[in-house]
Structure formats: structure tokens, C-alpha cells
Amino acid sequence: MKSLLSAIAVTACLAGPLAASEESKTWDASDEAKQFVVDTIVIGMLASPYGTGWTDYDQLHTYFERARDNGITGHEMTLAAADMSFETLQEQHYHFRAAMAEQPDKYQIVNNTRDIEAAHLHGKTAVLWNSQTATILNGDLKKMALLKDMGIKSMILAYNDIFRTGSGQLAAYNGNDIGLTTWGKAVIDELVRFGILLDLSHTGSKTANDAMAYMEENYPGVPFVYTHSVPAGLYTSEPGATPRGCYRAIPDDEALRAAKSGGYVAPTFTEWMLDGIWPDDISPEQAADMIDYYVQLVGVDHVGIATDDMFSTELVVKFATANASMYDDGGYMIDAFNNGATGNGELAKILAAITDDLWARGYTNEDLAKIYGGNKMRVYSQVWEGVAPEQFTKNYPERLRMRQELRDYFYSR
């Protein structure tokens, strides 16, 4: 695998795709943990846009069928990353929807939190769109209303490089964090207006902190989130850690600030971001370490989970090679790949084992229900529907009980 990846880095071409998510390991778990995952609302993340993460509709069908069979309720799904236009967004959206149209009874496009509950009840996949760039607006803020109608649920201001909104993490890593711009503030205004979550993953620290300050000053009480970001503080003492760490990781102060807003942070189980570890397969213990680190840092009410799954390492490296200026990381990502970090801990294959590990650490079922989906649901309910977080928290246990009774009845017939 390592020699193949070296070849990819040079040629960006292989005869057949390396399906990193498909090749990830399935971890043994107790029957009790498997059942808990099935019974619980679980919301992960598929950060693989059409063309840069997958190209074959059957890949999606296989992935989502496995996820449904293993109790994964839904996924935040990336429609656009890097410097993408509105037209590219439409193209990617079309292919996702065209694939789903082949099995229309298997998917639930999410407009509100009750759609997520309905997907869980009926065994469908809940679809939540995420954009990792604001460039899809094509410079026209009025498009935000259209994005809302398309089902965009969260948006990142800047991915890796410098954009009109501010700087991404890689630009900041290279010393070029321009901070939140006037245009970036206008984008945030429209995100809040239309109830779309501000996602600060991939955002440079100055730009992110400027955005958080802008939110705190102008929209106090409106949460912001990190949908898929590993904790930098977990890896600083690793023997193999690089001097500057992984540029995709976020410092503790940013995670704390997101939690203070009422939002959440969700670690991603993507191997190349685990600075200094770079395993052939991320283990349930390593994934649980990230979850536990965030829980100890910000509290159990402000932690979620993500995967950032990619179907094809070949396509990822091709994209990075074709957009070399946007991935100018001194070879960090390719080096991590060559050291064995070629995939992800796919949620369907690893979450039950993570459950066993977290139970052994003393986590309760209530804790895990929050981390696996409840915390996200609370934030979604607040941002999308204007429901006060205390009201959601008050009603959620009863809704959990009723939903489980309905699910048991539905599947017993």
C-alpha cells in the first residue's frame, strides 16, 4: 500500500480506485453495543463530494446500505469544498440526488429535526448537506435563500486557502491568515438569517476567532460548530508528532469557545490527521481517545462524532495534485499516506466497538446518546427551528422513549 501511494503521489494515476473507506477494518464489538447503536440516533459525516471522493453510484448504495444495517441514522454530506462555484455545487448535488433517486425509499432529505427522527424510525438514511466553502454563492448573497431551500444545513467560510471570506487552515499554517473580511461578515449575517449553521472546520485560527467574536457580538446565543476537526492538544506529546502538528487540528481554545456558544465539536476518524500516529487502521481506542479528550475539555453536552469518509485515496490525491497551491503543506498529507494513514474509521464498521470502549471508561447510555446524535439535534433544533436549547433538552428524553416504542412497534409487525 505504501509503495502504491508513493506512486500515486508521483503520477496521480492507478488502474483502479483505492476505496479507502471500503477497505477500512470492521472491528469486533459486543451484541449489546451493536444494538445500542441501532437504537440510538447516530449522525456522522461523509465528506466526499462527487468527483473528488466518489464517481460510481454503486459506491454510495453500498456505503449507505452498510451504514443503515449498522444503525447509522444519517450523515452530514459535503457538496462542495475548496474553490467551487454554484454551478459545481449544482453538478455535485445532481449526482448525489440522481444516485438516491435509484432507491428513493432509502433516503430522507432533512429539512427539520423531525425528519431525522423519521429516518431513524423507518430505517432510512437522513441526508444533511454541508458546504465546505462560501464560494458557491458566486458573490451573490441572495443565493443563500436558494441554498437554504436546497437543504444546505451548514457552511464553512474558508477551506485551506485564502478566500474572499478569510483564510483556511493551510493558509494560516503557512503564515497567511488574513482574518475575517467584510464579505465574510456579510456571509455570516445571511447564514444566521436563514438558519444555516456556521461551521468553522478548516478555518484558520485568526479567521475563526474573528468569526466567533462577530457571532458573539452580533448574534449572542446562536451556536457555531466544528463539524469535523481533530483536537490538536491530544497529539502534541506523541513521540512521532511533527513540529507544527497537523494543520487540520484545532487548538483547545477554539473548541472551548464553540462549546460556550452552545455549539459542539466533532472529531473526525481520518487517519492522516492523527499527527504522529498514522495507523494502518485507526482503532476504536484511538477514536474513543479523541471523543474523551473533547468531553474532558468542553463537557459531554458539546461533543459529536464525524468520519470524513473518503471512498478513493486515488481521487483524493489526484485532486490535491491538481490543486497543488491549495494543498501546499510541505508534503504532510502525502507523507502521512505513505506512513500508512490511507483511510478512515468508517462509522458503520467502528462505532459499536467505540461504544464498548467508552462504556469501559464509564460513559453512560445517556452520555453516548448525546455524543452520537443528541447534541447535534439540540443545535440543529435551535438554529433551524428556533427551539430554545433548554426546551429541547427537557423534551428529548421523552421523545427518545416514544420514538423507541414506535420503532419497536414498527419492526415487530
Image (cartoon, helix red, strand yellow):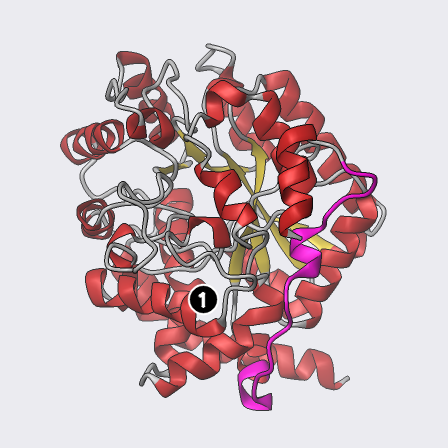
Can you see residue 53? Answer: no
Look at 47% across and 22% down and name the residue there: 326
Magenta highlight range: 14-34
Picture layout, residue 297 above or below residue 387: below
Residue 146 lies in the magenta-colored region: no
Give the residue type at disc 1: Tyr
Residue 401 spot, x, y in % from top left: 48, 80
Q: Position of residue 153 (x, y in %)?
A: 49, 40
Which residue is located at x 38 percent, y 68 percent? Answer: 370
Q: Is residue 373 visible?
A: yes
**Nearer to the camera, 69 or 82:** 82
**For residue 394, above or below residue 107:** below
Quadrant location of the C terminus in the rendered image: bottom right
35 vs 272: above or below: below
Q: Residue furthest top?
A: 139
Residue under the point 81% across and 42% down: 56
Q: Residue at (23%, 46%) from the top-left corner?
A: 251
Q: Main secondary structure of the magenta part?
A: loop
Residue 1, percent from left and from top: 67, 53
| In the foreground, 3 or 55 | 3
* Count of marks placed on residues: 1
Q: Nearer the viewer, residue 296 or 4?
A: 4
> Would residue 75 appear left or right of 208 to someone viewing this image?
right
**Dot 1: element:** helix
Q: Is residue 131 left or right of residue 245?
A: right
User: Label 1: few (<14), some or many (≥20) within 10 Å?
Assistant: many
Q: Which residue is mark 1?
A: 372
